Amino acid sequence: MKTIRILILILISYLQLNAQDFQFAWLTDLHIGFTNADVDLENCINKINNNQNIKFVIASGDITEKGRNSELEKVKSILEKLNKPYYIIPGNHDTKWSESGLTKFTELFGDNKFSFKQGNSLFIGLNSGIPWRGGGGHISPEDLNWLTEELESNSFKELFFVVHHPLNDGIDNWYKAVNILNDYPTKLVMVGHGHNNELLNFSGLPGAMSRAAISKNRDSYGFTLVSNETDSIKFYEVDSSSIAKYWGGIDKSLPLQSNDIDSAETIVYDAEIVADFSINETMVAPVEYWNGNLITASNSGLVSCYDTLGNEKWSFDVFGNVYSKPVVTDNGIVLVGTLQGDLYSINIKTGEQIQSIGFGNAITSKLIVIDYKGEKNLMIPKNSSDDDAVVVGLSNGEVYCYDVETLQEFWKNNSAKGMIETEPLYYNDRIYYGSWDGNFYCIDAKKGWLIWKWNETKNFYFSPAAVKPITDGKHIYLTTPDKIVYKLEMNLGKTVWKNDDYDVWESIGITNDNNTLLLKGINGSFHTLSASNGRTHIEYKIGYDLDTNPIEIASVNNLALFGTKQGDVYRIDLNQKKYKKLLFLGNARPHSIKVLDSDKFLFSNMDGRVVIFKYSEKEN
């Protein structure tokens, strides 16, 4: 009897130990919107539903091809056919062109991150996609704080961390996540993005990448079946064949070899920092400067006013998400647009709301103020003779012009059929802007009529939509993601010349004398180019990493200034043909540097950091 009792106890102990063993399905890179991607996903779901051993499903980003609302709704309708829970995060394809600024994703799926427990295992997924700023990865300061809170508030024996981009230099601030994960029993870091089955090592943390769900560049649709066992994690590819193919495993008994990574947030090379502060939240919208005031707008909708030393004067909550750069009129009226489609006017002295108006679609363009010279009579009389009007671009391509004082409509243009992301150019009673429908537009600023439309490609991905157009007074200059620089005639929209010799994406500027174009290449080189002929050229081989972040190059006194996605700030001396690294200000996508004075500049980045600096005159 004693022997039988011992055997029973051993059996119970074994069953309890193995009760934590489970299997789950891992989908990634669904790319709904790409040809037949929906069919591939349906096939994957049928396989998953027919496997009763699968407890849940994880989808690790690039859920859609272009992040469109219709694509998100489609993938939601397909995933709802699962007969088991699923947990989902976005990827760069869901954020780069998102017409809702990812609000549609959150509306449909409840959040853009997740946390849940399966037995003694904790699963946490974070978004690494960057809104409207290229294909690289970044984890927001809010999500890093949330990650810490989730880990501290949960009891668990093993951690599974899910993120779309590989947790290395594919995410610019990867080390911040690694340093947090090092304090916990991280058994697996799950990533997508690479469309391949591969075991990885992220600074000592065990990792794995899974194949894409779509059959693009492969023979079949598919997903990874993950088996979490007592001493190991095993990976199997499931595709159209009937056999689950083992492709790798991780020994959970091996000790972690990860160590904390030291990193600096500030390095001063050749500059003087005058002010340095942070709103400690994602700031997609660039900072606006007006008469000694700095206007910030956080992703969560908190609009704040600071002095140039970083002291807060006031804050106002617009109860919506803000991605568009605010603008301030000469009379001190702050204008802010939200992704929920609301336009607010705020008194810059008091921070009090003046009024607001709603649109049917997200406000996505950077706002500009123009001097309205049209003849439309407003229904509500104005109290002043002020002619300020605000131009607003929406996610569906519509552009509106509204009187600032009364927020009454002057005109509407619906020529474009894609999101307006850029900051439109206002010049000589005309407004110039690109759209994610592949076209570049010129419209009349008095009546909103279309004057001309320009297009050199039908490829969505090469749309002239993120670049801020610049002018010399007679021509428009712009760059597109197919690495082409264009010069257009302003009156008729005809191409004067184009140049595809340089690795330029969507970052351009022009010198104060309008003679030289300033171009940030994506592969470590800065270029100057003759605005006249598009040929006379100087290359500065700086050596920064791949950088597709769209910015405008600042120019003053024959100097060019710009920031890289790695957080470095450079100054190019166009006379001496030399460059200097001035500052390192943290790993986050920078906004365009703004000239405040001949030697004073405003820097800000998407992590909410704001810096005013001066450059040094000392020679290297």
Image: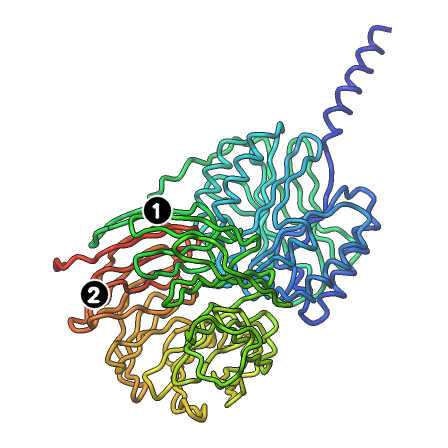
Do residues under tags 2 and 1 come within 8 Å of each other at their CB atoms?
A: no
Q: Nearer the viewer, residue 545 or 128?
A: 128
Secondary structure category for the residue under label 1: strand
Q: What residue is at 42 percent from the left and 75 percent from the top?
A: 385
User: Residue 178 location in percent, x, y?
Assistant: 47, 40
Label whose residue precedes the other's in the sequence (2 or 1): 1
- 411 above or below 169? below
Q: How is the image coloured?
A: rainbow
The quarter of the displayed image where residue 416 is located: bottom right
- Callout 2, which amino acid? Ser
Q: Nearer the viewer, residue 400 or 300?
A: 400
Residue located beneath label 2 in the image: 598
Residue at which label 1 appears: 277
Q: Amino acid at mark 1?
A: Phe
Give the side of residue 591 with respect to residue 543, left or right.
right
Residue at left 65%, top 59%?
104
Image quadrant holding the C terminus, namely bottom left
Instruction: Look at the image and tell me in which quarter the N terminus lies.
Output: top right
**Residue 193 appears in which quarter of the rendering?**
bottom right
